[in-house]
Amino acid sequence: MALITLSPVFIGIVIIYFLVILGIGYYGYKTTKDEEDFLVAGRNIGPVVGGATLSASQMSAGTLVGTFGIHYLLGFGFIWIWPGLWAGWIVSLLLVAPQMRRFGRVTVPDFIAVRYGDDGANGDYARAIGAFLIVLAYTVYLSAQVTAGGLIFQSLLGLAPEIGMFLMVMTAVVYTAIGGMRASMLTDFMQAVVMAAGVLVAIPLSLHFIGGLGTINALFQSFEPSFVGNSLSTSEVVGFMAAFGFSIAAAPYEITRIYSMRDEKTVRQAIGITLIFQTIIGTSVALLGVSMRVLFPQLSTPDLASVIMSLNVLGPVLGALMICAVFSAILSTVDSVMIVSGAGLAHDIYGKLINPEANERQKLWANRLSVGVLGLIPFVLALNSGLLGGLVQLIVVLQASMMGGMFFIPLVLGLHWKRANTIGGIAGMVVGFSTVVAWHIGTNIYPVIPKSISSVITDPVIPGVVMSFLTLVIASYATGKPSKKTLEPFFDVTATDGGQEDQEH
């Protein structure tokens, strides 16, 4: 089926969508007065907007472009990633999110600087390391979103992918840099609704074109039974589940949103709402991805499946809604990640280490400038996306592995184990991150890890988390107890708690 010509209605709806996004950015600009406003929106976000923004920021291009494309490529089997991700949310609900909201700072490096603050510099070294690792990992993540944006603009307008990538980056940079977290969360709410509506209206139309679920089953059973079964090995499924599960429980861009909510009760309610959103969208994307394989079996890349469906199956109004849903998936994550990465530079490095005497106006504009700079760097990385995995979803999985490997253990043990100390926490972060990167290089770029091992341990998050755990525990026991000042914000401290320096006073 040939691509249709874009109708004025289709173009008009997409233009209105972008104007609304920019309008929300302007509203955020007018209502943002200081750095805390910019980074955590005044801490007054309720459960519905909070649940929607957790969904929208997590369901990125990796969902409506990448996961859609993986289902197109592999069939229904990839749906097993969702239980892993939901398990991560449940771990966060029980062990991370309420505790972090109670702590109530601004960034994850704020937590690291306090909990692992016995570094001889009042937590500044620990903060800098955490911020630097966040910027590295999220630069990888943003490259996936930029890659997806380039594919969409190429399909819609025939633009070179590089131009499409640049347009996507600039849109996100403008409304995020001027509007901050308030604009980000309000657009996330709108984008989560658009995503859910887009995939729900697409299902009956796609099934109508195909002839129903029975047709899908009959077609694939005739030439590729794995499409309606499990096309992935058990080890591959476990690897994907682990990557998303470990990362979502410790994702800095989700924790920043948790800081923005009213209280711990709101956080718990918001996580429940996000699970509903994700169930709807995850199931719908699986059905639509497989349906598109029936209708368009010869796409040049699986990542185009959702865009081709919008142009050829849904008609101008619903097609435009679906394209807006795809843009929503990308932008809602890009703005989240840029705020967190920008805060790593502006709040944690500039404001805390370089210029602690900066006034609110200086800190606010430092955040805006950082968002702009860190929004452009992934554009360069996206031009060389083969280094990261090529397909959008594979780049997203790599980033998830990095985040889970470096932060899951230091965050969970830091919140629940008094003996975790600064040396252990910092070492756990660095070793976890380094293990993930080394495993990725050793299996995907320069394959030196034996197939007999990499075929069983299919995702680098597993060795990353294991090494992070062993490093943190061994290093903590091999060195002194943490000081009381690093424990008091998180535990009921007794006379026996605290390192030697506390007991001497």
Image (spheres, grey):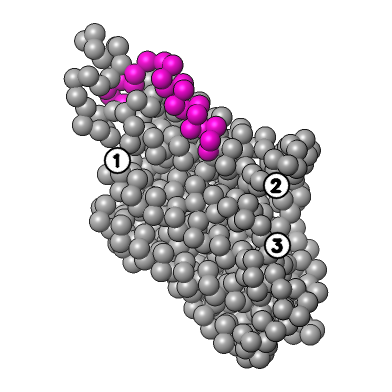
Amino acid carrying label 3: it is: Gly
State the image coordinates of residue 329 (x, y, percent, origin top left): 55, 65
Ranked by sequence position, the earlier of labels 2 and 1 is 1
Within-10-Å neighbours for mark 1: few <14, some 14–19, many 20+: some
Secondary structure type for disc 2: loop
Within-10-Å neighbours for mark 2: few <14, some 14–19, many 20+: some
Q: Going by the picture, which residue comes out furthest to the left?
A: 495
Amino acid carrying label 1: it is: Phe
Residue pointed to by mark 3 = 150
Q: Is residue 11 above or below residue 178?
A: below
Ranked by sequence position, the earlier of labels 3 and 2 is 3
Give the number of the disc on residue 455: 2
Residue pointed to by mark 1 = 103
State the image coordinates of residue 27 (x, y, percent, origin top left): 41, 63
Residue 16 appears left or right of 274: right
Secondary structure type for disc 1: helix
Residue nearest the viewer, comparing 313 with 77: 77
State the image coordinates of residue 372 (x, y, percent, origin top left): 57, 48
CB under 8 Å between discs 3 and 2: no
Residue nearest the viewer, comparing 320 with 490: 490
Residue 274 appears left or right of 267: right
Q: CA distance from mark 1 to mark 3?
A: 39 Å
User: What span is in magenta?
Assistant: 465-486
Q: CA distance from mark 3 to mark 2?
A: 32 Å
Residue nearest the viewer, comparing 60 with 93: 93
Residue nearest the viewer, comparing 141 with 298: 298
Residue 236 appears left or right of 331: right
